[in-house]
Image (cartoon, rainbow, N blue to C red):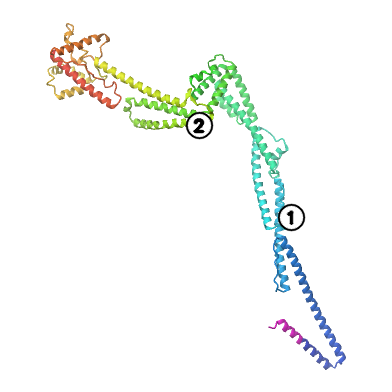
Amino acid sequence: MVRKSDALATESVTCLNGALAHLRNIWEEIGIPEDQRLQRTEVVKKHIKGLLDMMIAEEENLRQRLKKSIDMCQKELHAVCQELNLSVCMPEEDCTMLQLEKDLRTRLEVLLKQKKERMLKLKSLKEQDEELCDILCTTAYPIDPDTVPSLERLDAFHEHIASLNVEKGRRRAEFVETKKKIILCMEELDQLPDTSFERDIVCEDEDAFCLSNENIIGLKTLLQQLEMKRGQNESKCFELRNQIVNLWDWLQISQEDRDTFSANVVGSRVKTMQALQTELERLEVLKQQNMKNVIESIRRELATYWEKCFFSSSQRQEFAPYHDDDYTEELLQLHNLELNRLKEYYQAHQQLFEGVWKWEENWKLYLSFEKKAADPNRFTNRGGNLLKEEKQRTKLYKMLPKLEEELKVQIATWEQEHHSQFQVNGQNFMDYVTEQWELHKLEKEREKQERQLKKNKLIEEEMLYGSAPKTPNKRRLNALNTPGKLRKLNGTSIANATPNSTLRCAIGGSVCYSPISRPPLSGRKPGQSVRTPGYSTTKPPRLGLVERNKENISHLNATAMSGASTVSTPRHNLSINSVATTYSEFARELSKASKFDCQSRILNSTTSNIHP
């Protein structure tokens, strides 16, 4: 296939031949001689040849320049690839010089742009690094500013800068926070910055402070010193305040004076410490003037701590100065030492003592519930008190063993840690608890025996003297004292007694008469009238009449043996309000008393019929 350039060249040759032929025709028509035609043709030849030579030279020059450009681009591209740590890209073999030069130049421009960007980024990171190094007083990042860095090196440099910024922020926040604390401590201590370092911290701008490790360490050291000094002042003020409060308590200073002084003396500054020291000196003078009152106050406080620590009487007696009446400064010092020792002892065992106190309170409550449980009057309570009491008692019964077990574990742990025995009232706590339970058991047994003895004694007295209710039925007494009813009763025999009359006797007989305490008819004095059974005395006879009553009993027995219908048997009539502690006992005693009272009245009626 013929290229267009070749066709154009052929056309150019045709044009040139046509032009030369036209020139020859012109010369022929003009009549120019042959020699002149040669000359003119030579001029045309030279002109055309020169023009072509010039054009060839220019194109040759272009070719040379392309070669040079290609060589230069290749060299630069090789160098840039080495700087950027990239592999060299080889051109295609079948491409022309112009295409090759264009490709190399384009590739070179791209790599040069990358190089420029990396160098600019390196320069920026380098400036940030220098700034951060100046602030943090650290060494610069080891990187050559004139060498093109790789992408990995730039990333590492960037991470280093980021870490420095984080460290800067941390140190800045730490510096600001520490600076505030230092200023606050100096204000509380009434202290001004003395050294140049302290002035740089307090007086200078925060951005101007060098955040080096040494300065941060120095900052922390200064704060520790100031806090230590402040802590010493606080401890001193706390100690002074405790001494002042103790002296206030011992000297019985009014609460109004205490509040006035405390409101004006706050904190732990030097002025505050001076004011506390002045007040302490004033109170010391008053203490010397009121030595006896102060020692007595300390003794009361000692007694309080003895109670808190469950000291036994022998342990309390070990402090002999407690009973000394010679109120001197030495005695006061001894009391102060003992009081401080007790306070330290109580603080070291406070958790255990609080547990023991809790057990003591619950134990007292348990004993009170036990006492209420034995009281029959508790059944008369209204408003659900009995139910509430039963719930509390059930809860307490469950809680006491758990509390004892917890205290047992705590005390065992404490004894293992301190290698000593924890004592309450001079003995081991668990032994103390066991002893309390044993004493409670013995007390219940003793109360039970006392109730039984009282009951037996009451039964014996009623068997001997008869019983009388505490609240007699007035209506029943009046009915029994009516003569008509007495006659009716006297005229009625035991055999004619109806069940209803017996029931009325058992239920309505609120006053019980003892036939034993009434002398027989043969033993009455002359002229003495016969007493109506309804007016029989309800009081037990005097001790002087005991022997006579025995005779009366034997006389009644003799009368029964002689054929009389009167039968006198010792009665076991019991008082309803005597020993009934539960409802069942109450019912049994009521039934027994009614039965015996009915029998007594039947016997009295029979006696009246025999001896009119």
Is residue 11 one of those drawn in magenta? yes
Residue drawn at x 44%, y 31% as measured from the top left: 405
- Looking at the image, which is closer to me, 222 or 417? 417
- Could you say where residue 473 lies in the image, as x and y percent from the top left? 23, 20
User: Is residue 6 or residue 71 the one in the foreground?
Assistant: 71
Lower sequence index among marks 2 and 1: 1
Graded by Cα atoms within 10 Å as few (under 14), some (14 to 19) or many (20 or more), the crowding at tag 2 reads few
**x 51%, y 18%: residue:** 317
Would you say residue 81 is visible in this rendering? yes
Residue annotated with mark 1? 145
In this rendering, which labeled residue sits more in front, label 2 or label 1?
2
Numbered mark located on residue 171 in the image: none
Q: Please name the residue shown 85% across and 90% down the image.
A: 37
Disc 1 crowd rating (10 Å Cα; few below 14, some 14-19, many 20+) is few
Tag 1, which secondary structure? loop
**In this view, 400 is above or below 157:** above
- Magenta residues span 1-14
Q: Where, quadrant-wise, is the C terminus in this rendering? A: top left
Left or right: where 429 falls relative to 17: left
Q: Quickly name the residue at label 2.
A: 413
| Image location (x, y in percent) of residue 279 | 61, 24
The question of residue 444 being in magenta is answered with: no
Q: Residue 467, how many percent across, how many down?
A: 25, 17
Residue 256 image-quadrant placement: top right
Q: What secondary structure predominates along the stretch shown in magenta?
A: helix
Give the Cα distance between marks 2 and 1: 69 Å
